[in-house]
Amino acid sequence: MLIRKVRYIGIIALSILIIVSIVYSENKKVFSSDNLSQELIICTSLYPMHIMALNITANVPNVRLLSITPPENGCLHDIQLSVTDMKILDESDIFIINGSGMEGYLEKVASSFPNLLVIDASEGLNLSHHDHDTNPHVWVSISMAIQQVQSMGEQLAQLDSGNKDIYLKNTEDYIARLEELKLRMHQDLSNLKNRDIITLHDAFPYFAEELDLNILGVVQRESDSEPSARELAETIELIREKEVKAIFVEPQFSDLAAQTIARETGAKVYALDPASSGPIHPNAYIDIMGNNLQTLNEALKE
Ligand SMILES: [Zn+2]
């Protein structure tokens, strides 16, 4: 009886030891990056977060950067995670999200992968003084992108503290370049008299707010369908009434509706890129915004 009891206790003790060592090794994966054989897998939810993370994790040893949405997809709203997405998340240690309400599937992720560490790049962002605090396209404003980079960099430095200095240095360097871009955009656009724009989708409220552009109308609120006949008619009327000269479409979406409006009104169609998709390159966001600057100057000059 006593022997059986001792054996029983022994089995329990061994089980506890195994569980503890599994949990410990799981945690170790994230927190001890000085162990050279271990890889830290970071997954991003969205293209602009991927470009930020690419800059912040540059030269950090043993980091692998993944993404659940392919870069050509753009920002898909209300998406369901695919089997492939779930596999990628299962493999990941850290999941970086845009936040601000973009990732509607977050609760599902949290319950499916309780050990996955989530970095919300919108943490600390105060949207309450904006008129559009339910619009998730915060990164399209360079000021807000800078705050997201800051937040992402600090959170990564905290989670992977062995490489803290590299993350913080990268963050500082990238922010300096973004500040430069912001200054250039403000200076270049400061003399425009015509600041009225019409956009096809609703990705630009923070961008316009920052650059003091006036969005007179958004052709359609829902980005995944063609605008209705009524939306088209209303926009055409608005353009005629306000003598709007430029309609901006996103390269990620069909410009069929914009071309129809242009034919009816004589307004010209230009592509303005919300940087929700593009090439996987550290300079991509800055390049895209540089192109937007040229487009705005071209479209809005007298
Ligand atoms: Zn979007």
Image (spheres, helix red, strand yellow):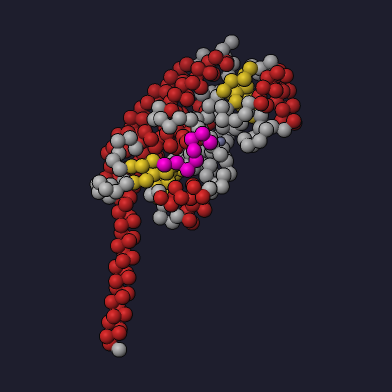
Q: Residue at x 29, y 68 (%)?
A: 17
Find residue 104 and report its horizontal and vertical position in percent: 55, 47
**Quarter of image, res 179:** top left
Q: Is residue 195 above or below residue 204?
A: above
Q: Residue at x 43, y 32 (%)?
A: 280
Residue 70 magenta: yes
Residue 196 visible in the shown view: no
Q: Residue at x 63, y 17 (%)?
A: 268
The quadrant the N terminus occupies is: bottom left
Position in image of residue 36 (x %, y %): 25, 46
Q: Nearer the viewer, residue 254 or 77?
A: 254
Q: Position of residue 175 (x, y in %)?
A: 37, 30
Number of on-image labels: 0
Q: Residue at x 70, y 23 (%)?
A: 260
Question: Does residue 221 appear in this view?
Answer: yes
**Quadrant in which residue 220 is drawn:** top right
- Quarter of the C terminus within the rendering: top right
Report whether 194 appears left or right of 99. right
Task: Judge left or right: residue 124 versus residue 243.
Answer: left
Q: Residue furthest top?
A: 302
Q: Residue furthest bottom?
A: 1
The answer to whether residue 232 is above or below residue 135 is above
Instruction: Residue 157 in the image: state x and y as whole percent.
Output: 32, 42
Q: Which residues are magenta?
A: 66-73
Q: Is residue 71 left or right of residue 193?
A: left
Res 215 → quadrant: top right
Any magenta on residue 175?
Answer: no
